[in-house]
Amino acid sequence: MNIQKNIPLKDYTTFKIGGPAEYFADAKSIEDVQEAFAWAKENNQPVRVLGGGSNMLVSDAGLKGLVIKLSLDKLEFNEDKVIVGPGVVLSYLLNQSLSKDLTGLEFTAGIPGTVGGATRGNAGTYGVAMDSVVQKIKYLDENQSLQEITSKDAEFAYRHSIFKTKDWIILEVELKLQKGDVKAAQELVKERLQYRQDTQPNLPSAGCIFKNVHFKDVDLKDLKVKNIEIDKFDKFKKIPAAYIIEKAGLKGHIIGGAQVSDVHANYIVNQGEATAEQVIMLISFIKQQVRDKYGVQLQEEVQLLV
């Protein structure tokens, strides 16, 4: 295993922000991952795992210990079953599945990142997420032993899975898709990609910064009094974080090189020289303003790595 030193992590994140990894390994197989962990244990180094680099913000000081980039790109189709490595990019998986006349992944259209990160965070759109297609997950547990878990036991919830609470590393995901109307699926994907292009920024970002707000977590009557149009969001029983942030007058707000996107208010964009500290300050400011104006406590969807 080639262990490198002082590798800039901004080159491996969609935010283009972050200091160096003290040690860095690019793992292309399960054996590579196991070897990297063995090296870390032998050298008494902590381990952090990196996938596609979306949905995360890396500290300006970088990360101590060993950062393992999961580049496992296995992709096997067996009728409606798909075995896929965590390093496979979602857009590639979607296109390959459609080319095999398999549908069910249309909800991933436009979601940045890899299968591993999407499974860990149960990524989704339009009320559909990874838990709708995941069957089994092969992983490395905290003792570096190979294990397997079913979707039922993965504790999937909104933007959550058991992998967010355990030191487990996703190594392989089994998906179940279905034969369907591929032309209709392709049209839907095309529409959604166009919508994302029209409504989301093209500057470096980590994707959506905050989770959308569940009806059950807020005082709906109070929000109505404060001119939040609750009825608009009754279908999914969630208020988009972007809507609340924009209502609070924060669209376009800037701290240093970090800006609340003037295209989509739930994105913070890197205008070129943004630091992690500036992004964190902007996140804190947004949360404080929204809390003061609407009594809503926003929760980060982005993962902070320090």
Image (cartoon, rainbow, N blue to C red):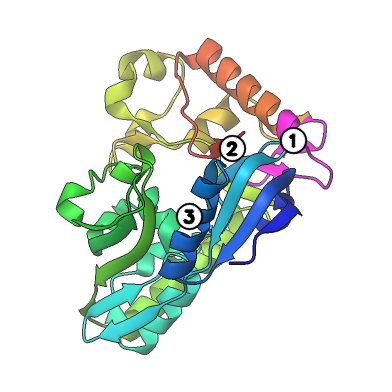
Quarter occupied by residue 176: bottom left
Is-magenta flag for residue 74?
no
Q: Which residues are magenta?
A: 255-278
Q: Position of residue 114 (x, y in %)?
A: 48, 62
Q: Residue at label 2?
A: 305
User: Which residue type does callout 1 highlight?
Assistant: Ala
Indicate left or right for 148 with 264 as reference: left
Image check: 101 left or right of 251?
Answer: left
Give the number of the disc on residue 61. Answer: 1
58 with respect to 161 (left or right): right
Give whichever of discs 1 and 3 has the lower sequence position: 3
Q: Position of residue 284 (x, y in %)?
A: 62, 21
Q: CA distance from mark 1 to mark 3?
A: 25 Å
Amino acid, disc 2: Leu
Helix, strand, or loop for circle 3? helix
Query: What x and y, as percent, mark residue 122?
Result: 35, 50
Height in image: 144 above or below 85? above
Q: Residue shown at 49%/59% (left/top)?
A: 111
Q: Secondary structure at mark 1?
A: loop
Q: Could you tell me how far apart the alpha carbons at marks 2 and 3 are, in whole angstroms?
A: 22 Å
Residue occupying the point 34% across, 66% down: 172
Q: Residue at x 77, y 31 (%)?
A: 254
Kindly check if marks 2 and 1 are in contact, taking CB atoms under 8 A apart as contact: no
In percent of width and height, residue 194 lies at: 55, 67
Q: Looking at the rendering, which quadrant does residue 189 occupy?
A: bottom left
- Cα separation between marks 2 and 1: 10 Å
Does residue 284 appear anywhere in the picture? yes
**Residue beneath label 3, please?**
38
User: Dot 3: within a 10 Å radius of its alpha carbon, few (fewer than 14), some, or many (20 or more) residues?
Assistant: few
